[in-house]
Amino acid sequence: MKIQVTDFDLRHTIESGQCFEWERYKKGYAGVIEETFLYIFQENDFLHIQAQEIIDNISSPITIENYPEREKVILNKLCHYFSLDVDYQMILKKITIDDHMKKAIAKYHGLRVIKQPHFPCLVSFLLSATTTVRNTQAARRNISKAYGNLIYHDKEENRSFYSFPSFTILRDISEQELRLQKTGFRAKYIHESLQNISIDEIKELESKSYQNAKDRLMKLPGIGEKIADCILLYSYHFDNVYPTDTWVKKFTKSLYLTKSATENQIREFGMHYFNGYAGWAQLFLYIYFREGIS
């Protein structure tokens, strides 16, 4: 299957540090979203997609010929996941308010904020605490392999792709067992967090105000301001949050504020300066400065 896209760059979007479920594969990227294996690559204005799901205990390709309704569902989910259903030009107009933003958008045009499934996103950002994207991806893959379902196996490359485990399964895994998946001290955060929130509460964060949703997340072990904001931006459509990590602090102080600016001042600045789309602006600036174009 394929879909035509405009103003979208798959590589910029997947490799911008906002998600951890994809790995490089053949001509593009592969990962499992919910219970669907997806191999995606981009050629000009087209996304080419191969999908596999477990049907009647068999990993089956999803095509318009054999599963037309499932194909429609998958394409709709991808449009939502990659924010292909938003007014991209309107967002760019809102955040293109200085020369720094103009340069970042020109270099990374097509970058979009991903909207990930809630529960895997929450656990992924717990795993991301004080470590690298690569380590977070590895720990997430270990958890999926240990407790998820095998969705697709590539015999030629001898690579297997697993779904992320359900809330119920992961909640019942002990901290000691989670540590075996190379999660380190984050195992404690994951285990204790899942004892202190329900899957219904995770879903209900959608309907809360930004501050109420953030306050609820920050009651969980291991979730501070930055991780809460990342979860709310990359899963819950709170587009005006300004996750403030080391990179964001550096470029915000350098470009807009002073060296003495506090984390709260940086966060407040971003949320007031970028016309309701602080999260999109910080993602452009983050990848722009992370790759050394300062």
Image: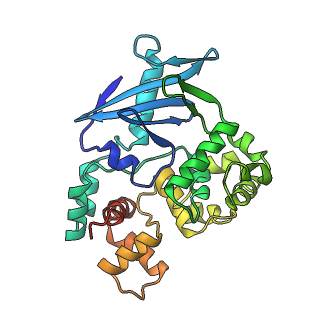
Going by the picture, which residue comes out furthest to the top?
Answer: 65
Relative depth, front residue between 186 and 216? 186
- Who's the residue at 46% across and 70% down the image? 244
Q: Position of residue 114 (x, y in %)?
A: 42, 48
Q: Is residue 212 left or right of residue 172?
A: left
Q: Position of residue 186 (x, y in %)?
A: 67, 59
Relative depth, front residue between 256 and 241? 256
**Displayed quadrant of residue 192:** bottom right
**Displayed quadrant of residue 117:** top right
- Who's the residue at 77% across and 54% down the image? 175
- Who's the residue at 46% across and 31% down the image? 38
User: Residue 207: in sight, yes or no?
Assistant: no
Q: Position of residue 193 (x, y in %)?
A: 71, 57
Q: Is residue 128 left or right of residue 198?
A: left
Q: Is residue 285 left or right of residue 35?
A: left
Q: Quadrant of the N terminus?
A: top left
**Displayed quadrant of residue 39:** top left
Relative depth, front residue between 79 and 206? 79
Q: Quadrant of the C terminus?
A: bottom left
Q: Position of residue 285 (x, y in %)?
A: 32, 64
